[in-house]
Image (cartoon, helix red, strand yellow):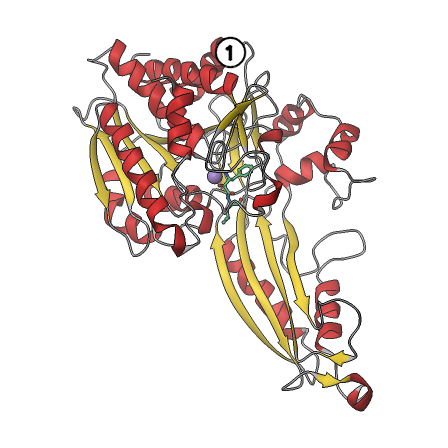
Amino acid sequence: MNAVDIISDYVRFPSVSTDPAFSQGMAGAREFAAKLLADAGLRVETVQTPLHPILLGRRDGPASWPHIVLYGHYDVQPADPLALWTTPPFDPQIRNGRLYGRGAADNKGPHTIGILGLASLLRRRPDLPLRVTVLLEGEEEIGSPSFPGFLGKYKGELSKADFVLLSDTGSPSAKQIVVTTGLRGIVGLELRVKGPKVDLHSGLHGGAVFNPIQALADICASLHNADGSVNIPGFYDGVLPPAQWERDELRKFPLSEAAYRKFLGVNALYSQPGFTPLEAVRYGPTLEFNGIGGGYQGEGGKTVIPSEAFAKITCRLVPGQDASRVLKKLTAALKSRIPKGITAEIIVRQGNNPYHVIPSGRPGAPKNANPVLARAFDAVGSAIATAFGKPPLFLREGGSVPIIGDIKTETGLDSLMVGLFTPDSNLHAPNENLEIEIIERGMRAYELLLEKIATP
Ligand code: BES
Ligand code: MN
C-alpha cells in the first residue's frame, strides 16, 4: 500500500480525544498505529495511562548507536462544525492534490510520513546502526494530561536518547519547508464572575447592583494596554527577544504583510510594540480571549441583569517565560480587579512551558550540544534541500506542542521539528488536509535525514 492510502486508512478512525463518545475511534487509531509500528519492524508496547494509552515502538541496538525518539499524536480535534466539510471528516478523499480529513495534517499524516520514511530506510539498510523509540500519544489535543506521569516512569530510558524528532508544525508551502526552532508555551483558564444569586429584572433592580457582564468586560478590557501590550505586572519578565539571525531568517519568509492580511480577511493587522505582525506570532507572547458569555443569548431582547458571566482566556508564552509564574501573575491580576459586589471563580485549564533550541552553527548555539543533535541539524538542511528542492528556513513557531518543553526539562532532550503542514491545511477547522506532494517528499527527507544521523 502507498503512503497516501495508509494515511487515509488511519484518518478513518475518529480519534477525538476530548469526547468519551469517541473511545472506539481512539482504540481503532491506536491499533492501526501499533500495526504501522510493527510493520516497520519495531517492538511495540502499549503503556496504559489514566486516560488514553501511549504507544511505544522500539528498535533496540548497542549503546554506541545513535538513539532518536520519534514523537507524534494519534488523537485529533473534534470535527465540528460538520456542515462546513465538503466531504465527511472521517471519510478521507483526495482533491486538488490534497488529502482531506480530520487528522490528515494534525498529526496522523506527518508522523506517518516519519514512520514510513524510517520503514523504507530499514528495508534498504537492515543493518543500519540506529536506535529508535517511536512515541505516539493520544492526548496532545487536550494538553497531554497523562504525559507528566508517563515521563516520570520512562524518563530514565528516554533521557539516554539523543534527541526528539517530530513533525507537528507548519511550513509556508512545499517549496519552502521550515525547521521549527521554538514553540510557544500556553496557559489557559476560565474566569467566572458572579453577581446576584439569580438573573434579575433590570427594571426592578437595575441601578442597585454591579452587572456581572459589565464587571467581566471591565476586567477583560484591563488586560491590554492601548498599544496592544499585555497589562499584567511582570508578564514580560524574562522574554527572550529574537536574535538578529532569527529576525533575518524571518525576512526570507515568503509572505508579505499585505498577503497575510488578505489571507486572514482583516483590513489591518494589530500587534504589540517591538514586533512586526509576522514577528509577533513567532517571537512575542500574547493574551487572547477564546470565548466569552453571559446573559441572554436568544432571539430578540430580554431585560435582565444576569447572575453570572464568563471568559475563557489563554496566553501564549515565549522562551524565557515560565508557565507557572505567568499563571500566578495572571490569576493575581484578575483577582485584584474584581469589583465589590462581584465574586469570581478561576478554573485553570492548562500550563505548559515554551521551548527553544538554537541549531548548531548559529550564534549562541551551545558548545556542549549533543553531537548527534548537532549532526542532525546539519543534515536536515541537505535532506530537505534534496527532497524538496530548497534548503529550509529555521524559525520559531507560534503554536504549542505542550510536551516538548516538559521533555526538555525532564529528560534534557532537545527537539528537531520539521514543519509538514501548510497554511491551507485548515488545522482544527473544517476541510483539514495535507498536500500529497509533501507526503512523498517528506518521506524522502526523513529517509535521508535518518540515514545521515545513523551513518554520517
Ligand atoms: N499541531 C498543533 C500545534 C501547532 C499549531 C504548531 C500550529 C504550529 C502551528 C498542535 O496539535 C496543537 O494544536 N496544539 C494546541 C495545544 C493546546 C490544545 C494545549 C495549540 O497550539 O493550541
Ligand atoms: Mn498537532
Near-viewer residue (170 or 298): 298
Mark 1: secondary structure = helix
| Ligand 1 is within 8 Å of the C-beta of the residue at disc 1 | no
Can you say whether 443 is above or below 420 in the image?
A: above
Is any part of residue 241 visible from this angle?
Answer: no
Quadrant showing the N terminus? top left
Residue at x-position 70% and y-position 61%: 223
Above or below — where is 312 with respect to 208? above
Q: Does residue 286 appear in the picture of this structure?
A: yes
Instruction: Please identify the quarter of the rendering in which residue 127 is found.
Output: top left
Q: Is residue 148 left or right of residue 219?
A: left
Q: Is residue 299 left or right of residue 181?
A: right
Residue highlighted by disc 1: 385
Residue 348: where, in percent of width, then height?
50, 64
Q: Is residue 421 above or below residue 128?
A: below
Label 1 Cα crowd, 10 Å radius (few <14 / some 14-19 / many 20+): some
The location of residue 446, given as percent across then percent down, is 40, 19
Of 247 and 100, the residue lying toward us: 100
The amino acid at mark 1 is: Ala
Image quarter of the C terminus:
top left
Which residue is pictured at 49% across the width and 32% down the height?
Answer: 105
Q: Give the x, y percent position of residue 211.
A: 74, 79
> How far from the left and from the top, in percent, is residue 375?
39, 19
Question: What's the residue at 30%, 14% (across, down)?
Answer: 121
Total of numbered circles in the picture? 1
Relative placement, left or right, of 306 versus 303 is left
